[in-house]
Image: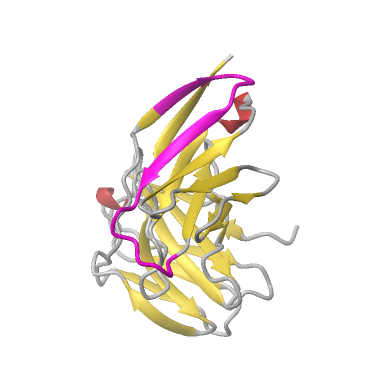
Amino acid sequence: DTGVSQDPRHKITKRGQNVTFRCDPISEHNRLYWYRQTLGQGPEFLTYFQNEAQLEKSRLLSDRFSAERPKGSFSTLEIQRTEQGDSAMYLCASSSMRVVEELFFGEGSRLTVL
Amino acid sequence: DAKTTQPNSMESNEEEPVHLPCNHSTISGTDYIHWYRQLPSQGPEYVIHGLTSNVNNRMASLAIAEDRKSSTLILHRATLRDAAVYYCIRPPRDDKIIFGKGTRLHILP
């Protein structure tokens, strides 16, 4: 499968715990995006990378959230000291430099904070 | 920034054409219009994009108004598998694809 893969698909955690999500983009894609989606809403932009550089981070993202893409390949999104409001689907997408507007999404990682 | 407006939901009968409208009255002359859709329990998927003229691909057609202030995504023969949320995407600002709430399309058998 050469699509975008995300792991884990589901995560249930207790409030205050840290969680980490991983995204493996399509191999030749330079751009990698993280979005968050809650029920009934469209995906909300969180951050994006071009290769290993994090080019922008949403103002909605608190300091508890951090994302990395150390070698310009896979990316991780970590949430520290989770809160119930962090419960959402976390989506990863990638795109090539040639057609940056055509995003390829993974199936998402669903986080439930109890 | 260019903003898009879509109806919250629409219904259509199976095997009939569906026209999903989008208003983007503040779009600039060089901005492409993109459509994505999100099937239940899946991430969004790219559908089609266009600039001025009508565009066709295997999934859908995109009809763009002459003044470019609106566009219509056309599914020529809706199936139950086309039930999804359809997003008309504002042109990227700083390379960020921004999604609105989209149109939830219900297909009636």
- Residue A66, position in %: x, y? 36, 73
> Relative to A21, does residue A9 appear above or below in the rendering?
above
Q: Residue at left 57%, top 55%?
A: A106
- Residue A113, position in %: x, y? 34, 47
Q: Residue at left 30%, top 54%?
A: B25
Magenta-drawn stretch contains B108: no
For the record, the magenta segment spans B10-31
> Is residue A108 or residue A83 the one in the foreground?
A108
Q: Residue at left 50%, top 59%?
A: B52
Position of residue A101 in the picture relative to residue B16 (left or right)? left
> Relative to B107, does residue A35 appear above or below in the rendering?
below
- Residue A104, position in %: x, y? 59, 59
Q: Residue furthest top?
A: B109
Residue A24 in which image quadrant = bottom right
Magenta-drawn stretch contains B29: yes
Let me know if residue B13 appears in the view: yes
Q: Residue furthest front?
A: B66
- Residue A99, position in %: x, y? 58, 71
Q: Residue furthest right?
A: A1
Let me know if residue A11 appears in the view: no
Residue B58 in which image quadrant = top right
